[in-house]
Amino acid sequence: RIYDNSDTASFQVATEISQLIRQRQKQGKKAVIGLATGSTPTKVYDFLVQFHREEGLSFKNVVTFNLDEYYPMQPDSIHSYVRFMNEHLFDHIDIKKENVHIPDGQLDKEDVRDFCRDYEEQIRKAGGLDIQVLGIGRTGHIGFNEPGSSLKSVTRMVRLDRVTRLDAASDFFGLENVPTKAITMGVGTIMKARRIVLMAWGEGKAGIIRQAVEGKIRESVPATFLQHHPNCEVIVDQAAGSAL
Ligand code: GLP
């Protein structure tokens, strides 16, 4: 879907999420939502906060699982995705702390494998992801599933692509400060979500969006795996959709 701009597109995505939450509330059930970081989803989070404040949308029945976190990463660091999520969403809504899940960037190396296995288990126990929100990296990564990630990959520690690290360099005040690793949900974890919404804004994403949507399905562009998903929508503004 190509929208005039990222505002109207983000409003649409936030509205879909709020409808899911309300529908689950009526059923006395939880809504299980996979969340992303980066600049792309921030307006969606702004609208969700607005719906909470102005329309009384409650997040008490919402369980969230974030896609990824840098490794190593302290949660209070300005670069951590924990801090990002608190600042953009969680600090402004009534979600229960115990319902928020973000990969732990401060684990000892030897504990990462167990943590990742448990993350998968927790998603499964929560009933699976009702919806997964995604951005896309210039390498075609989803979460931090860089080129070479397989369709069946699960939550794990990964090495970041140089392009991804270059893109993050200004945030980290220099490439040398960007972590070389991350913990991410796998492509397989993402593919199990019942609904997927991938968003992209701006000219800089036009090329990779074209590859993701129209390109051959292959490991060198992990977002192409989404073409296999029965209920995935790619939502772009005019600029990001300009090469389609
Ligand atoms: C990071 C995140 C991805 C995100 C990507 C794009 O690499 N781990 O989940 O999709 O950045 O970032 P942005 O939305 O800022 O373009």
Image (cartoon, rainbow, N blue to C red):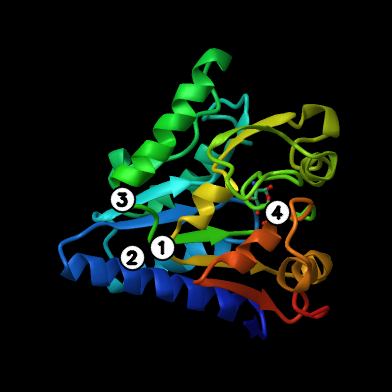
Q: Which residue is mark 2?
A: 52
For discs 3 and 2, the disc positioned in front in the rendered view = 3
At 46% from the left and 39% from the top, the residue drawn is: 102
Q: Secondary structure at mark 2?
A: helix
Q: Which residue is mark 1?
A: 49
Side of 210 relative to 29 (left or right): right
Residue at 52% from the left image edge and 39% from the top image edge: 83
Q: Is residue 188 above or below residue 157?
A: below
Q: Amino acid at mark 2?
A: His
Per the model, the C-alpha gap separating discs 1 and 2 is 5 Å
Q: Mark 3 highlights which residue?
A: 95
Placement of 21 over or under 2, stated as above or below:
above
| Cβ–Cβ under 8 Å for marks 3 and 4 | no
Give yes or no for contact between labels 1 and 4 (Cβ–Cβ under 8 Å).
no
Label 3 and label 2: CA atoms lie apart by 11 Å
Residue that carries the numbered disc 4 in the rendered image: 222
Q: Earlier in the sequence, mark 3 or mark 1?
A: 1
Q: Is residue 233 above or below residue 118?
A: below
Q: Is residue 53 visible?
A: no
Amino acid type of the residue that numbered disc 1 sits on in the rendered structure = Val
Mark closest to the chain's N terminus, 3 or 2: 2
Q: Earlier in the sequence, mark 1 or mark 4?
A: 1
Q: Nearer the viewer, mark 3 or mark 4?
A: 4
Q: How far separated are the C-alphas under marks 1 and 4? A: 31 Å
* Image coordinates for residue 180, horizontal then vertical, percent: 75, 29
Tell which circle, 3 or 4, labels the residue nearer the N-terminal end.
3
